[in-house]
Amino acid sequence: MSAQTQACIAGIYEHPLRVAPDHSVARLHADVAHGALRDAGLTINDVDAYFCAGDAPGLGPTSLVDYLGLKRIQVVQTTELGGASYLSHVGEAAAAIAAGRCKVALVTLAGRPKSEGSSGTKPRNFGDTAPDVEFERHYMSTPLNSYAMCAMRHMHEFGTTSEQLAWIKVAMSHHAQHNPHALLRNVMTVQDVLDSPRVADPLRRADCCVVTDGGGAVVVVHPDVAKTLCQPLVQVVGMSASVKGQSGGQVDLTHSATAWTAPRAFEQAGIGPADIRYASIYDSFTITVLMQLEDLGFCAKGQGGRFVADGQLISGQGRLAVNTDGGGLCNNHPANRGGMTKIIEAVRQLRGQAHPKVQVPNLEFALANGIGGFLGSRHGAATLIMKRV
Amino acid sequence: MSAPAKPLVFQDPLQNPENQTFWAQAQQGQWMLKHCLACDTSHHYPRPYCPHCGSDQTEWRASSGLGEIYTFTRMVRGVETPYLMAYVKLDEGVTVLTHLHATDWDAVHIGMRVKLGYSASASGQNVPIFQPE
């Protein structure tokens, strides 16, 4: 990504609804597409690239490009990394723009798991043909038990405690109180989290993200286009994605694929963890945040518990402001995929458009990190670094 | 915490043609691993091509059925019947996703020695589980 063609995130939009039983999934995609284009000062007639993932209905882009009426599409991409997909989409859109293949890329996410009765305690159906299904479906691998086994191992190896995990939820709840759209707006204490019922130990209900309908979208544009628009310029300066699984039975649940993606993204951006004061960290569960913070290099492996304790992730109070919208743990986790809202809040922070109570002053860089799929079996990860110019 | 009165009955495992040996031997009381002759390493879940080196020189070998708990969780809410899920590291060095059957759930811990056991699925296929040694 050369400086001359460094793509910018020009438009963002988060659907205000958290429960949308009377909206189709396609309509939610349309709501967020138009919202992000409006935010950028563009229209659907400007879009020449479209990105979506497995939440898109029908044949994905084939269905939605037609539905949305996008008539100038030259680049179509459907990277599927679960909830981390959209961070990858932004980086791939920036690369396509740098290569001269398109100028205005639209990325959308939407779904309504809340209205459809989704729960993290139920197995997800990824179809019969996934090669792992034969050896895992009958054991009922679910988000809850998969992430819980990571937390159990982390506690065993490093002495991480439930109190430390609870601090992550507490920080998100402090931020969510200022977000009028957040599903959970009550400030929680560590004791509140510990008092919530155990679901899959060591994880309790409060260690889990919310289930919400809705969605979000971003618009990534060529710098020449960005300069003609109204929003503050936010450049895409680094992105790396990867996948980690059970490694053929050499299972190691102590780190995520972020341990591989973060160094590459930081190298592209020419900075390190010490340069980051705001980070959007995928918070499907509290343990997800803790492991990513270690893998991103904000602290040494095994020190995540100490890093997050005592409000250290609360904006204006702690050492690193994380998920100032309230995150997936309290605000929003549309379509069971949290990557999009991670990008959106990071862009708000860089623009200076976060809520005044949680805005980090004078940011130059922000990071968004995603984990999609199941941390305890196989997951995708993507690290995205953005810069205010 | 003690085990539920009636343990969970597994749904019938989906079985692919290339893994008939795994399921037939499971019925006979064994956990089969795929072993690669090229890199002399076993793997799970089983594949025709070794995930460690890419060779197609893989063959079935019986595991000892002995190992230790790498990690586990007690799934107690949001399910009809609570269950213990675990990763067990077999003595052959391969870690596998499975369930545990134990009378005293509070005694289960990481590092605990376990041995192979069985639990019949809805239609009688033996699904491998592990229990304290």
Image (tube, coloured by chain):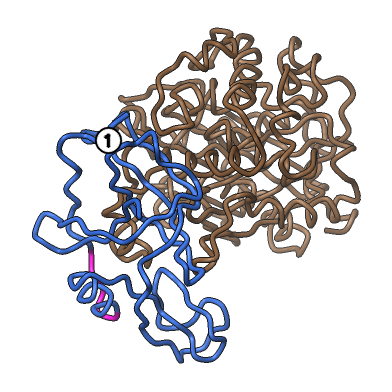
Chain colours: A brown, B blue
Q: Is residue A349 shown above or below A80?
A: above
Specify start and end residues of the magenta stretch as a single range: B14-18
Magenta span has B90? no
Q: Is residue B40 shown above or below B76?
A: below
Quarter of the rendering occupied by the C terminus of chain B: bottom left
User: Residue at position x 68%, y 51% from top?
Assistant: A258
**Res A120 quadrant in image:** top left
Residue marked by disc 1: B82
| Residue B101 percent across, percent down from the top left | 28, 47
Does B58 sit left or right of A225 as displayed? left
Q: Is residue A86 shown above or below B125?
A: above
Local crowd size for mark 1, using a 10 Å CA cut-off: few (<14), some (14–19), many (≥20): some
View extreme (front): residue: B133
Q: Amino acid at mark 1?
A: Pro
User: Residue at position x 61%, y 21% from top?
Assistant: A163
Magenta span has B17? yes
**Res A171 quadrant in image:** top right
| Residue A27 percent across, percent down from the top left | 40, 35
Mostly what secondary structure, the magenta segment? loop
View extreme (left): residue: B123
Does A162 sit left or right of A280 as displayed? left
Does B48 sit left or right of A340 as displayed? left
| Residue A181 percent across, percent down from the top left | 53, 15
| Residue A367 percent across, percent down from the top left | 76, 39
